[in-house]
Amino acid sequence: MIRTLAVTHKGELLTDLPLQSITIADYAWVWADFASPTPEETLLLDTYFHFHPLAIEDCMHVLQRPKLDYYENVQFLVLHALNEVTLEAEEIDLFLSKSFLVSYHHQQKSEMDEAWEIVQGEIHSRKGWSGGPMAAAYTVMDKLVDKYFPSLYSLEDELADLESMGSTESVEELMSQVFNVRGRLLKLRRTIVPMRDLMYRIVNSQHVQSNGEERIYFGDIYDHLLKLTDMIEVDREMTADLRDSYISLNSNRMNSIMKTLTVITTVFMPLTLIAGIYGMNFRVMPELDWAYGYPVILLLMLVLGAGMFRWFRRSGWFK
């Protein structure tokens, strides 16, 4: 599907014009959005806009790393949107010039729809920063970055819950959840860090067709990406701390169990020795003929067990 937005030199907004009927020179600027395009629609990148073959190839072969390339007064940008369910990156490509913006993406994205509505509203209202293709490109990038925050906030809530579940869940279950959160943080990092680097290049590039005021807006997006990367690093450190805490907790529990088993084994060692001695099949054992031998041996075993238990307790083995 291709949707179009054209602004006349008088500032009038025209939408949903057939792309082939648009002569870009007749308008102040034009935005063409290729959303889940068919192969025939994709061919228009070459036959109508005459973009560089390498840029068109990058559009066809996803997933490219976020980048900025320059082709004869046209900037080609590869951006990454975020799938809120899988946290996987989804590519959005922009062709930017002074007279047009072309956006190309294989999936329908709500961020693009929101940016489309905002740009139309800005043009109608004549308020705010409605400066043409560069303003529209900024709006797209801003919406893409805004969508990163909810997913990261959700992961931070999960980490907060994990911190309070240490005494109610098994260590194995907690460790599994920690590694799950850590894996999703890694997915976010793979999307956000390259976008941060790209935005830094846009803000500091002399080739990007923007004035000083527009660079302030792109700088604001860059600040948001810096905040996101800092949050991810803090959350990754938190998962590492939680992992180490759970490992220490598990080791402490194992040590406690081993100490208890050691005490029980140690108490029963002399009792087992006594039982083993009188369980031997020698014919000459005087104690076997003694009338009080059985109760005396039982009493001895009880005294030994109780005495050792008391000694272990006074030695602090049960603390």
Image (cartoon, rainbow, N blue to C red):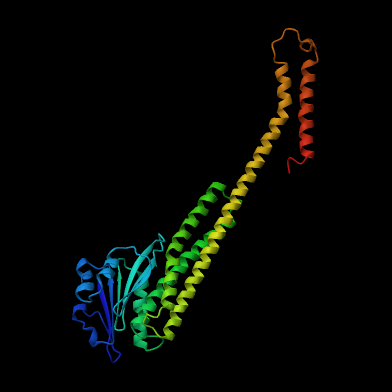
Q: Is residue 144 visible?
A: yes
Q: Position of residue 271 (x, y in %)?
A: 73, 24
Residue 139 shown left or right of residue 223 in the figure: left
* Residue at 23% from the left image edge and 87% from the top image edge: 26
Residue 142 visible within the image: no
Compared with 87, 265 (above or below) is above
Q: Position of residue 248 (x, y in %)?
A: 62, 49
- Quarter where residue 5 is shown: bottom left
Q: Is residue 268 left or right of residue 122?
A: right
Q: Quadrant of the N terminus?
A: bottom left
Name the residue nearer the viewer: 101 or 253.
101
Q: What's the residue at 54%, 50% (across, down)? A: 175
- The spot of residue 130 in percent (x, y) is 37, 85
Name, please, the residue furthest toward the top: 283
Which quadrant is the C terminus positioned in? top right
Q: Nearer the viewer, residue 146 or 79?
A: 79
